[in-house]
Amino acid sequence: QVQLVESGGGLVQAGGSLRLSCAASGRTGSMYRMGWFRQAAGKEREFVAAINWSGGTTSSADSVKGRFTISRDNAKNTVYLQMNSLKLEDTALYYCAAADIWNRVYEYWGQGTQVTVSS
């Protein structure tokens, strides 16, 4: 089992920045990939960005390319999402997720942290 706790959300004006953190605990030695997802009110959850736990290969959604950066600190078992040039449409509940090396699907999820972008 892997436990995930997100932090760093809040209220920010359009054009501003926030950094989200996701701290992992438990069987972190089995982690394969970690990702960020978001869900806006009335919409389905969507992929934002992901990073391989070893090697550090990243991927991100087209909607956030050039604005959001995912990174990791293996020593702290923490993944970050640096969000710059925030837009109103980035408002959502942001979730951290983890996939282990056996199943390689996102089966561990955090509780989410709210990001609200105001005009």
Image (spheres, rainbow, N blue to C red):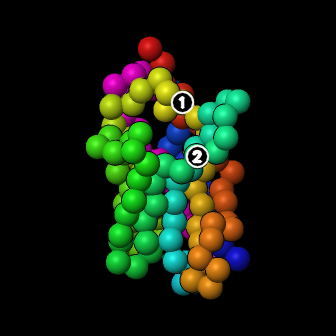
Real-space Cα distance between discs 1 and 2? 12 Å
In the image, residue 22 lies in the stretch drawn in magenta: yes
- Using the image as rendered, state which of residue 93 and residue 5 is in the foreground: 93
Question: Which residue is at 63% across, 40% downward?
Answer: 39
Q: Residue at x 67, y 40 (%)?
A: 44
> What is the tally of numbered marks visible in this picture?
2
Image quarter (top left, top right, bottom left or bottom right) of the C terminus: top left
Tell me the kind of residue under disc 2. Answer: Glu
Q: Residue under label 1, please give it.
A: 91
* Label whose residue precedes the other's in the sequence (1 or 2): 2
Q: Position of residue 82 (x, y in %)?
A: 37, 47
Extent of the magenta region: 12-27
Q: Residue furthest top?
A: 119
What is the quadrant of residue 57 in the picture? bottom left
Residue at the spot 67% in from the left edge and 30% down from the top edge: 41
Q: Characterize the magenta stretch by its predominant secondary structure.
A: strand
Q: Which residue, given by chain and number where applicable, does mark 2 sit on?
A: 46
Residue 51 placement, left or right of 103: left
* Callout in the foreground (1, 2): 2
Q: Residues within 10 Å of mark 1 (few under 14, many from 20)?
A: many
Picture coordinates of residue 117, whole percent (x, y)? 48, 25
Q: Quadrant of residue 104?
A: bottom right
Contact flag, marks 1 and 2 (Cβ < 8 Å)? no
Tell me if residue 115 is in the magenta stretch: no
Q: Amino acid at mark 1?
A: Thr
